[in-house]
């Protein structure tokens, strides 16, 4: 029996408090996105593996949960990422829209994680995509929106970690057979590993020296002064500087950390990439970047940038206010013949905006429990319908009980 | 203040000597084996003494900013960490060892006893040898003697333990040293402190 109750590794059930917190964060973020003109889209939970990997590239093929659709024999995969799906919507249904196109979504993605890593495999995401011309203004809008939206859920102290995947792609593209090994060492900021890896292939000297300097090219803005002097990457460094100077106009107040050696997230990033991190937790709150080739893989060339917030990471550093989920009234009829009045009362209170629990067949145990619970909660009270002419309200804060002879009187005098 | 998780056991002594050389007054780590946390506010560091295989977890989840741990553990665990520096301490080899007279063709399915099931699995798969891995937590050298396995995959520094148990190195999988690992977020939010820490260690490590 125990086996039947357990869940596959990396997925969980969420009790009401947690589920409501997740929903609240999603709502607050989506609300902010809509204030910036981002429209919602919904994409499927699973689709053909071929379609997903068209956007994500080969290396993600092993990182998705896939299965055979029994009705067709097709291999389908649970979505590990929503960005390529949004890209597909743009390339199909929205290709005639005037750019820029601003889209947002919330949903769950499924990640493949090593067994035993203990990491969540089901990730709650809320994200935005800005499709249209590749410009520092577009990059800045997406970055600014990401930081500001975190502010809306109460997260003010963040670090914006920013880099340029185009720069890394350019350098990695020159490493030939050693590419994989260079990538691995780069991800670890392992300079000695980079030395070994670049020795193996005939990497041009200037490229090699630049690659070897990458693990040190992180820190404050002074890093850019250093990086600008390296001629092979100057173009990318200037792009990044352009984005940062537009970003300054948004006055975000977020600390900025440059990291030119950070090879992050998905392979599809082609330009400025970023993460917003909190000193309080080790996984980023959100991650994003420019991906100018992705939508083209679905048959329509368009540049884009976007980001996705990891809702559970957000909840590690902030709490949302839960008073909204408080039940205001409990309505209990003393006998079954009073059901109609009880329903009427509950409906009336609900239509006035209150949250009302209607316990039509409350036995004496439940009644006692409701009164006890009423004492300690922040609700307004428990209402007993004693007879058609006798309505008793037990106020929760004071514990005082008041009697009314009909509904109108209760509504006038009691509430 | 940065927090450093250090492997207990074979690495601890060398690691604390290295820290001392780098100017951190961490002498008492050696003297007091029961205490697990040592704070040195004047040097701006705090050390945690943990099991070798636990170091990556402490650092990855941010309980420590940095860690000192053997490359063997890092290859086996594959964590999401920065590995900016080879500290060149705790030098040893990860080897396949077997009793005298063993050769690969004699075993139909090779049985391998090891503390490193993932490394062993990958290594024999690459070699094209069908292997059954038995994960053990200690005294791995015993396994071939009592017939639990054909070979072992384990660390050896001097070869002394292998010799005592009449085992011979047949292949070397990797040269192992201790690495400095750093938490991804710490590297960014404490970038100056950590850069300085790396610089100091780099200066004093053996070349």
Image: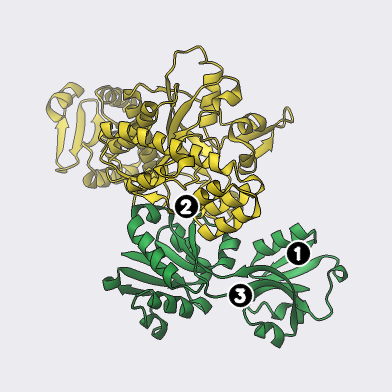
Chain colours: A yellow, B green
> Residue B132 bears which disc, if any?
1
SS state under label 1 = strand
Task: Kindly tell me whether residue A182 is visible in this rendering.
Answer: yes
The span from disc 1 to disc 3 (Cα, nearest Å) is 25 Å
Q: Chain of mark 2?
A: A
Nearer mark to the viewer, of 2 and 1: 2
Q: Are marks 2 and 3 in contact (CB under 8 Å)?
A: no
Q: What residue is pinned by disc 3?
A: B92
In the displayed structure, does residue A411 sit left or right of residue A252? left
Q: Count how many numbered circles sit on residues in the image.
A: 3
Q: Chain of mark 1?
A: B
**Quadrant location of the N terminus of chain B?**
bottom left
In the displayed structure, does residue A35 sit left or right of residue B30? left
Residue A295 rendering spot, x and y as whole percentages:
55, 25
Using the image as rendered, state which of residue B79 and residue A126 is in the foreground.
Answer: B79
Nearer mark to the viewer, of 2 and 3: 2
> Residue A213 bears which disc, if any?
2
Using the image as rendered, state which of residue B39 and residue A411 is in the foreground.
Answer: B39
The span from disc 2 to disc 1 (Cα, nearest Å) is 43 Å
Q: Chain of mark 3?
A: B
Label 2 neighbourhood size at 10 Å, few (<14), some (14-19), many (20+)? some
Nearer mark to the viewer, of 1 and 3: 3
The span from disc 2 to disc 3 (Cα, nearest Å) is 29 Å
Q: Quadrant of residue A321?
A: top left
Residue found farthest to the left: A413
Q: Quadrant of residue A44?
A: top right
Residue A280 rendering spot, x and y as whole percentages:
34, 53
- Identified at 34% across, 64% down, the residue is B2
Task: Identify the mark nearer the N-term, 1 or 3.
Answer: 3
Do the residues indicated by labels 1 and 3 lie within the same chain of the protein? yes
Using the image as rendered, state which of residue A158 and residue A2 is in the foreground.
Answer: A158
């Amino acid at each position: 029996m125990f086996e039947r109750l357990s869940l596959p590794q990396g997925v969980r059930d969420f009790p009401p408090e947690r589920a409501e917190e997740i929903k609240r964060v999603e709502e607050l973020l989506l609300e902010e996105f809509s204030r910036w003109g981002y429209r919602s889209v919904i994409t499927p939970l699973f689709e053909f593996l071929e379609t997903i990997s068209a956007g994500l590239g080969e290396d993600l093929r092993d990182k998705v949960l896939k299965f055979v659709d029994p009705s067709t024999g097709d291999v389908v995969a649970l979505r590990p990422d929503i960005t390529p799906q949004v890209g597909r919507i743009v390339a199909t249904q929205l290709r005639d829209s005037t750019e820029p196109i601003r889209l947002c979504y919330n949903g769950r993605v499924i990640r493949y994680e090593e067994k035993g890593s203990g990491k969540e495999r089901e990730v709650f995401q809320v994200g935005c995509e800005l499709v249209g011309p590749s410009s520092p203004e577009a990059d800045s809008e997406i970055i600014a929106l990401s930081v500001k939206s975190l502010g809306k859920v109460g997260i003010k102290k963040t670090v914006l970690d920013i880099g340029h995947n185009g720069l890394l792609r350019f350098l990695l593209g020159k490493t030939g057979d050693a590419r994989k090994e260079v990538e691995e060492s780069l991800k670890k900021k392992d300079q000695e590993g980079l030395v070994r890896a670049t020795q193996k292939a005939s990497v041009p000297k200037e490229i090699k020296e630049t690659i070897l300097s990458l693990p040190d090219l992180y820190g404050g803005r002074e890093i850019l002064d250093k990086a600008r002097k390296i001629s092979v990457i100057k173009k990318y460094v200037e792009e990044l500087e352009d984005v940062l100077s537009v970003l300054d106009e948004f006055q975000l107040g977020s600390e900025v950390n440059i990291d030119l050696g950070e090879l992050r997230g998905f392979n599809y990033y082609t330009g400025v990439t970023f993460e917003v991190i909190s000193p309080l937790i080790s996984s980023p709150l959100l991650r994003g970047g420019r991906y100018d080739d992705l939508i083209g893989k679905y048959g329509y060339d368009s540049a884009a940038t976007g980001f996705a917030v990891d809702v559970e990471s957000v909840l590690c550093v902030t709490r949302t206010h839960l008073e909204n989920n408080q039940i205001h009234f409990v309505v209990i009829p003393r006998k079954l013949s009073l059901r109609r009045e009880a329903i009427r009362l509950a409906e009336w209170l609900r239509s006035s905006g209150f949250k009302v629990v209607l316990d039509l067949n409350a036995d004496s145990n439940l009644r006692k429990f409701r009164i006890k619970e009423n004492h300690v909660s922040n609700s307004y009270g428990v209402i007993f319908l004693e007879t058609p002419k006798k309505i008793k309200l037990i106020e929760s804060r004071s514990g005082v009980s008041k009697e009314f002879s009909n509904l109108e009187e209760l509504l006038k005098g009691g509430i | 203040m940065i927090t450093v998780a250090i492997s207990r056991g074979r690495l601890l002594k060398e690691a604390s000597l290295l820290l001392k050389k780098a100017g951190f007054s961490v002498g008492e780590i050696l003297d007091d084996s029961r205490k697990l946390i040592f704070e040195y506010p004047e040097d701006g560091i705090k050390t945690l003494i943990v099991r070798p295989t636990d170091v990556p977890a402490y650092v990855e989840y941010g309980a420590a900013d940095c860690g000192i741990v053997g490359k063997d553990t890092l290859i086996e665990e594959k964590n999401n960490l920065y590995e900016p520096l080879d500290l060149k301490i705790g030098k040893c080899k990860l080897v396949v060892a077997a009793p005298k007279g063993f050769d690969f063709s004699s075993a139909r399915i090779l049985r391998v006893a090891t503390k490193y099931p993932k490394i062993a699995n990958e290594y024999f798969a690459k070699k094209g040898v069908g292997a059954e891995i038995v994960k053990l937590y200690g005294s791995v050298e015993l396994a071939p003697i009592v017939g639990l396995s054909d070979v072992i995959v384990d660390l050896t520094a001097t070869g002394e333990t292998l010799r005592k148990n009449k085992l011979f190195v047949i292949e070397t999988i990797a040269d192992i040293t201790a690495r400095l690992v750093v938490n991804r977020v710490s590297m960014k939010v404490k970038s100056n402190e950590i850069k300085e820490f790396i610089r100091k260690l780099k200066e004093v490590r053996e070349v």
